Image (tube, rainbow, N blue to C red):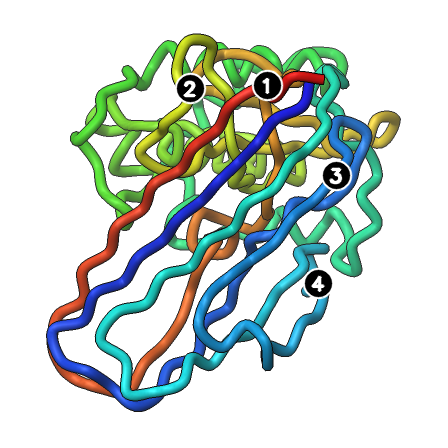
Amino acid sequence: MRVFVEHRTEYVYERPFEHMVQALRLTPPPGPGQRILDWTIACPGIEGAVSYVDGFGNLVHLVTPPGPVSRSMIVARGTVETKDAAGIAGFTGEAAPPGVFLRGTPATRACEAIAHLARGCARPDRLSTLHALMAAVRGKIAYEIGTTHAHTTAIDAFRDGRGVCQDHAHVFIAGARTLGIPARYVTGYLHMEGTETAAANHAWAEAFTDDLGWIGFDVANAVCPTDSYVRLAVGLDAAGAAPVRGIRLGRGEERLGVEVVVRECQQ
């Protein structure tokens, strides 16, 4: 499948400010399930951006928009050729070894209830365990938009029994790590038949097996990623894999708007 993506992020600031630094993880990596045909990022300051590959394998553009700034628009767009690899991202070759993804974060810390659920999913082999864990987490947490927020933790979502893709991924990661299985958070895009506009990025988890490498688990949809998915960035949790993160000097409120268009292209 050929998938076109346009990801627009707009910041509006109550008061103009002089200095800001933004880290953009907005470039999909190549892999077994995707080939990048074309991709561009447009935003103030991108011409002078420093780029590097971080320890998790994400291509990062470090941007300093020229000030004073009261509004900033970041547009990433391009075409990706995808295929169904049964969710297998494989051995992705980042500097950080799989064991790094056993490290917990405040967002992915497990409580005893999550650990108990995970232990109940243990099977003779790791892959079967992970599929059982995906089904168990999806059974415990109903998909309900607007019931959680960016700072909701795995423990919060598990306790309340509802959330969105971010929460499903965080709980799955927490459970996998309690079993000694490296797991990480993935941001990306999902093409849904019959629609082309989404409110924001999709998110899922990946877990590591010795024979297949990294494998994706979309708990929210109870499937491993198919050719409808485009991987974007990975991290220990949602904050670490965020497409845009930054810091600014200045006062006043900030308003954020995100619009993502994903559609299938004709071959």
Outermost residue, right side? 211
Sort mark 4 into few (<14), some (14-19) or many (20+) by Cα contacts within 10 Å: few
Percent coordinates x, y for residue 70 in the rendering = 22, 76
Q: How far is the residue under mark 1 from the one under mark 2?
A: 15 Å
Residue that carries the numbered disc 2 in the rendered image:
220
> Is the residue 209 above or below the residue 59 in the image?
above
Q: Which element is circle 3 on?
A: strand
Q: Quick one: label 3 or label 1, which is nearer the N terminus?
A: 3
Q: Amino acid at mark 1?
A: Ser
Q: How far is the residue under mark 4 from the one under mark 2?
A: 27 Å
Q: Amino acid at mark 4?
A: Gly
Q: How many marks?
A: 4
Percent coordinates x, y for residue 231 in the rendering = 62, 36
Q: With 74 as the anchor, is 265 left or right in this view?
A: right
Camera-side residue of 90 and 251? 251
The quadrant of the rendering that contains the N terminus is: top right
Q: Residue 37: which disc?
A: 3
Residue that carries the numbered disc 4 in the rendered image:
55
